[in-house]
Amino acid sequence: AALIDVVKNMPKAELHIHIEGSLEPELIFALAQRNGVALSYTSIEALRAAYAFTDLQSFLDIYYAGASVLLTEQDFYDMTWAYLERAHADNVLHTELFFDPQTHTARGVEFGVFVSGIQRALKDAYTKWSMTGGLIMCFLRHLSEEEAFLTLEQALPYREHIIGIGLDSSERGHPPEKFVRVFARCKELGFHLVAHAGEEGPPAYIETALDLLRVERIDHGVRCIEDPILMRRLAHETMPLTVCPLSNIKLCVFEKMSQHNLLTLLDAGLVITVNSDDPAYFGGYMNDNFVAIVEALPVQRHHAQQLARNSFTAAFIDTDLKQKYL
Ligand code: HPA
Ligand code: ZN
């Protein structure tokens, strides 16, 4: 089979998807209407036309505005179900979803509302397709550590539904060290730990995420290429990087896909995975990301197979399930 069909058909896991970033413009408008929420865009086309980002912050502003239409348990279910159907179509067998509680609690939406809606969709995907998944709760790093602690407190009644803790939003000026105490507490509580680092921020943020937050995966991490010693460390420690190719182009981390470094990192022995990040905003879901790298980079069959294997080895699943998927 042609490589493009091989990558589309391979079983894979997705480890870096913000569920609020799967909200398509059509659903944003439908939910705005259903909930009587006013939008500052007059049409789906006008909203989509605003998806011309220059950096991470220009995206985040629109992404948080889009999430403002989410109010009810059914809204969160509908958003999550739409994503899971797309993931299933791309042969995703396992998916770990980031969610941003503070984006919702700040608008008066209760914790139980979004956890329940997202969780119910995951349960249906398991029933229907045996697709497995989990939730990773992210703290917004532009907010304070105190607010993160408050969010952790609110999450505790739902902790059986949460497999891990992450750190997202504006990276520059908000280094991992800002969240040392709350991550230490999350580790004590037995959560898996991850953090966005080295997307826009410097390689030093990857090091502090490892040394101070004690994370088990780095989200993005592509700027490790600027520090050869760090690159060797990531390879030696088999520390997974959840790389998001289309995201990196849309947010101008690389000018074009042919300049993306993921194949260089993979060839250097790093545990690279491919993911969609915010598929509704960045131009595509899992297979769109795989197709984009196959078309722009000298990806060989063994690379593609390694990327798929890495997605399962890096997943937060027990060894039995891992064996089954590998
Ligand atoms: N980076 C940081 N925060 C985010 C992202 C991202 O790519 N997507 C959603 N929140
Ligand atoms: Zn992300």
Image (tube, rainbow, N blue to C red):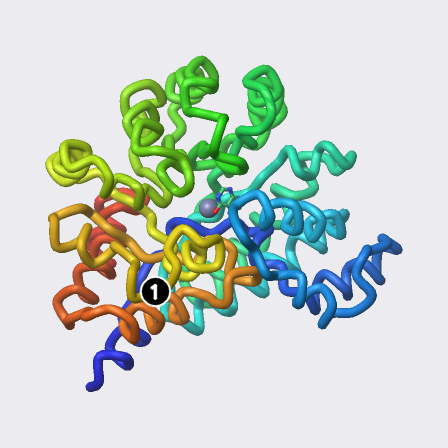
The residue lying at 52 percent from left, 54 percent from top is: 123
Instruction: Name above or below for residue 151 compared with residue 26.
Output: above
**Callout 1 environment at 10 Å: few (<14), some (14 to 19), or many (20+)?**
some
Disc 1 secondary structure class: helix
Q: Is residue 69 visible?
A: yes
> In the figure, is residue 113 to the left or right of 83?
right
User: What is the x, y in percent for residue 283?
Assistant: 50, 67
Q: Check disc 1 and give the amino acid type.
A: Met
User: What is the x, y in percent for residue 249?
Assistant: 42, 59
> In the figure, is residue 119 to the left or right of 167?
right
Q: Quadrant of the N terminus?
A: bottom left
Q: Is residue 326 visible?
A: no
Rendered image quadrant of residue 44:
bottom right
User: What is the x, y in percent for residue 280?
Assistant: 56, 62
For the image shown, how many numbered marks are present on the structure? 1
Q: Residue furthest bottom?
A: 1
The residue lying at 71 percent from left, 33 percent from top is: 105
Residue under numbered circle 1: 257
Instruction: Name above or below for residue 22 compared with residue 304.
Output: above
The residue lying at 37 percent from left, 31 percent from top is: 193
Instruction: Name above or below for residue 202 compared with residue 33.
Output: above
User: What is the x, y in percent for residue 119?
Assistant: 56, 48
Q: Mark 1: is the Cβ under 8 angstroms from ligand 1? A: no
The residue lying at 27 percent from left, 51 percent from top is: 321
Q: Quadrant of the C terminus?
A: bottom left
> In the figure, is residue 279 to the left or right of 238?
right
- Front residue of 306/133: it is 306
